[in-house]
Image: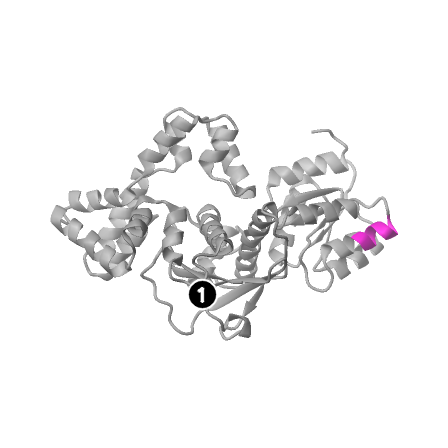
Amino acid sequence: MFSRHFGQFLLQEGIVTPQTLSRALARLSDARPLVGILALARGYMTPDQVREVNRIQKREDKRFGQISIEKGYLTAEKLEELLSAQKNEHVLLGQILVEDRILSHEGLLRALELYREKSGLSPEGYEAMTGGDTDRAVASVLAGQPGGKNSLVRNWAELFVRNVIRFIDPAAALDPLAEKGNGGLVTFLQPMKGDREITVFISAEEPVLADLARRFSDLASGAFDEMAREAVGEFLNVSNGLFTVNCSDKGIELDLLPQEEVPGNDPRLRRKPDGLLPLLLPEGILWAGILC
Amino acid sequence: MNEKTYSVLVCDDSAMIRKTLGGILGEWGVKNIFEARDGKEAVELYRKHHPDLVFMDIVMPEKSGLDALVEIREEDPSARVVMASSTGTKKNLMTAIDAGAFDFIQKPFEKDVIHTLLRRILKGELE
């Protein structure tokens, strides 16, 4: 997850060219398989078991490892071994760039230092971001936002990032350096009512949403047409549906209202969100926010 | 192949969901698929066609799926309605079951789950 974001940073800073980064990331995707693929490669799970866990993941807000342990396919020790093998992918990207002589070891260290400085992340946040610890990375991005300490906002944010990774792009990454410009963004929102009044929204430029739609539904063609709009709305609906289930398990009952595409100046979005996440997807930044 | 010609009503405000579900049903062999965009249309179409099965979303404009379920079951207590929603909270599950829903499935849909459901409900096969 961090690799694409770190790569984007290197690109923006002029440290690498698009071509060299693209080649390095392509090699990286070979170098960092998913937990399921790692489990397969090590003979811990069969292809059927991996497929079954993937299917369950589409219905339940659980991680691959957790489901695999519950099903008895992996032990906690084996999962830990697989997760260790996955970690520190940014080091792998760095290694590839060093191997390709795009960066020296010193240049890589300087680039990482520069990233840490510009991102404004705390040492813990930086560690979480680079180590692939999604929940801690989310907490770091939310720190200082109005709802940064609100457990409901935290739970929504952690789940939303997991949903993007699960349904849209396994390589999606939080991008604390992203800046929200004015205008040009298409926004979808969905209100929830019940024990609390909550509004969740997502905003992005059309190409980002068209690509999101294509990844979420086979019916979306990649153009930002009516079917893409349906798919984006449905992704928001599915994600919020899982959020309401999680809330219900904690004794907070929420009813979803229909999702809708709204203009950027919709009165419901005038207030500063309690939580706002910038997620780097292949076509650009997806903004996701919650007001409660 | 299924010998009987089954009819199914799909009710969802999303054309994408209706098309996705319609494709899964057609693949299984359902010949007559009716589409409704909200609970109001669903009640009207049920009244007209009396389909063998209904897939009903919950969150919809005009009339919610739960309200439509109640109306359909009042008119036809033997109606088989499966609630299909992204929000499978305990409250929604209990409300749907109390109102006579046959089953409840959570989005996003799995083709295998839908096909198993069709075998169980329409052909009476045990899992």
Q: Camera-side residue: A99 or A140?
A: A140
The answer to whether one can see residue A10 in this image is no
Chain of the residue displaying label 1: A
- Residue B89 point in image, percent of width and height: 64, 47
Q: Is residue A117 left or right of residue A32?
A: left
- What residue is disc 1 on? A206
Compared to residue A67, the image places residue A286 above or below, namely below
Tell me the quarter of the picture where residue B106 sits. top right
Please give the name of the residue rendered at 43% of the width and 66% of the height, measured from the top-left corner.
A205
- Residue B14 point in image, percent of width and height: 63, 58
- Residue A104 point in image, percent of width and height: 12, 48
- Residue B115 point in image, percent of width and height: 66, 38
Q: Secondary structure at mark 1?
A: helix
Q: Camera-side residue: A206 or B99?
A: B99
Q: Residues within 10 Å of mark 1 (few under 14, many from 20)?
A: many
Q: Is residue A202 left or right of residue B101?
A: left
Whether A122 is among the magenta residues is no
Compared to residue B102, the image places residue A13 above or below, namely below
Q: Camera-side residue: B25 or A154?
A: A154
Please give the range of residues in magenta.
B70-76
User: Taken as a whole, is the magenta stretch helix, strand or loop?
Assistant: helix
Q: Is residue A170 left or right of residue A213?
A: left
Please give the name of the residue rendered at 74% of the width and 48% of the height, measured from the top-left corner.
B96
The answer to whether one can see residue B122 in this image is yes
Question: Residue lying furthest front in this view?
Answer: A149
